[in-house]
Image (cartoon, grey):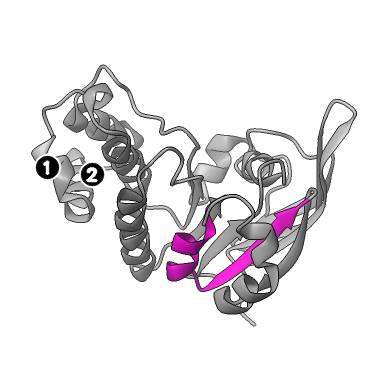
């Protein structure tokens, strides 16, 4: 068995006295796309925050590419290849598309390479390169946020609620691109409340509810056995 890109073992986290993660176990194989599904309040976004170093766990372990990273800072995780596209699309609204992208060159990636990658995955950004990011549609801003993440050449990409507030056709388009990104060898964990589109491109799926992962498997069997949980909101 090869070493998973991400392994979470008995992970617990709390806000004050309220325990939100109650012993999460999750394994994401290298090169795979895993959809992490579940209703609002299941603990999905808290799990992302703990994995990405934004929140400390109370107990449990995290391994990234076989490296034990419990308590690691966000910048240390980035050096190991972890990159997060957070819920809500983090772009600089008063900068143009090109300026948002070339900011990533300060991390040591040539600006030309950043732009080339972004425009290859998202040709619409080439059309919008001189437009202020804050004046673009939500879908275009999500494309920009993903492009900035890809500029760091991630080994593991965390996508938190990619579809939030977007029209279904845009979500389909974004997930088609997620599939293409995965084909380049990037391991991807998609955290989603809306299941069907994510499951189309996923190799594996896991379902969270009540602060625990309650099922894992291939997308078809998860949809069949857990549809009441994962499709409880919208599909």
Q: Which residue is mark 1?
A: 126
Residue at disc 2, secondary structure: helix
Q: Residue at x 19, y 39 (%)?
A: 111
**Residue 67 visible somewhere in the drawing:** no
Mark nearer the viewer, 1 or 2: 1
Q: Position of residue 124 (x, y in %)?
A: 15, 45
Which of 226 and 61 lies nearest the eye of the viewer? 226
Distance from label 1 to label 2 (Cα)? 12 Å
Q: Residue at x 35, y 38 (%)?
A: 145
Q: Are marks 1 and 2 in contact (CB under 8 Å)?
A: no
Q: Position of residue 210 (x, y in %)?
A: 80, 49
Answer with left or right where residue 102 lies relative to residue 35. left
Residue at disc 1, secondary structure: helix
Q: Residue at x 62, y 44 (%)?
A: 48
Q: In the rendered structure, which disc, 1 or 2, sits on the residue that comes first in sequence? A: 2
How many badges with numbers are in the image? Answer: 2
Mark on residue 5?
A: none
Q: Residue at x 29, y 56 (%)?
A: 173
Mark on residue 114?
A: 2
**Residue 101 visible somewhere in the drawing:** yes
Which of 85 and 108 lies nearest the eye of the viewer? 85
Which of 151 and 147 lies nearest the eye of the viewer? 147
Q: Position of residue 229 (x, y in %)?
A: 69, 59
Magenta-drawn segment: 193-209
Which of 134 and 77 lies nearest the eye of the viewer? 134
Question: Neighbour class for label 2 at 10 Å: few (<14), some, many (≥20)?
Answer: many
Q: Is residue 206 magenta?
A: yes
The image shows residue 126, relative to residue 28, as above or below, that is: above
Question: Looking at the image, which residue sits at the far right?
Answer: 17
Q: Is residue 47 magenta?
A: no
Answer with left or right where residue 104 lies relative to residue 222. left
């Amino acid at each position: 068995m090869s070493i998973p890109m991400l392994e979470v073992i008995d992970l617990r986290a709390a806000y004050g006295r309220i325990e939100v993660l109650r012993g999460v176990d999750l394994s994401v194989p290298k090169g795979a796309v895993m959809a992490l599904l579940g209703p609002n309040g299941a603990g999905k976004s808290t799990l992302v925050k703990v994995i990405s170093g934004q929140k400390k766990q109370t107990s449990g372990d995290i391994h990234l590419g076989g490296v034990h990273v419990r308590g690691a800072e966000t910048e240390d995780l980035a050096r190991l290849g972890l990159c997060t596209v957070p819920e809500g699309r983090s772009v600089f609204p008063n900068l143009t598309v090109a300026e948002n992208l070339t900011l990533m060159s300060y991390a040591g990636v040539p600006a030309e390479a950043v732009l080339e990658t972004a425009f290859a995955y998202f040709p619409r950004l080439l059309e919008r390169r001189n437009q202020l990011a804050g004046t673009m549609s939500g879908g275009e801003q999500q494309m920009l946020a993903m492009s900035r993440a890809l500029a760091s050449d991630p080994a593991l990409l965390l996508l938190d609620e990619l579809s939030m507030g977007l029209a279904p056709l845009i979500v389909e388009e974004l997930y088609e691109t997620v599939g293409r990104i995965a084909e380049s060898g990037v391991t991807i964990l998609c955290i989603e409340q809306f299941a069907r589109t994510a499951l189309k491109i996923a190799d594996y799926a896991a379902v969270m509810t009540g602060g625990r992962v309650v099922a894992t498997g291939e997308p078809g069997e998860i949809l069949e056995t857990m549809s009441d949980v994962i499709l409880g909101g919208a599909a």
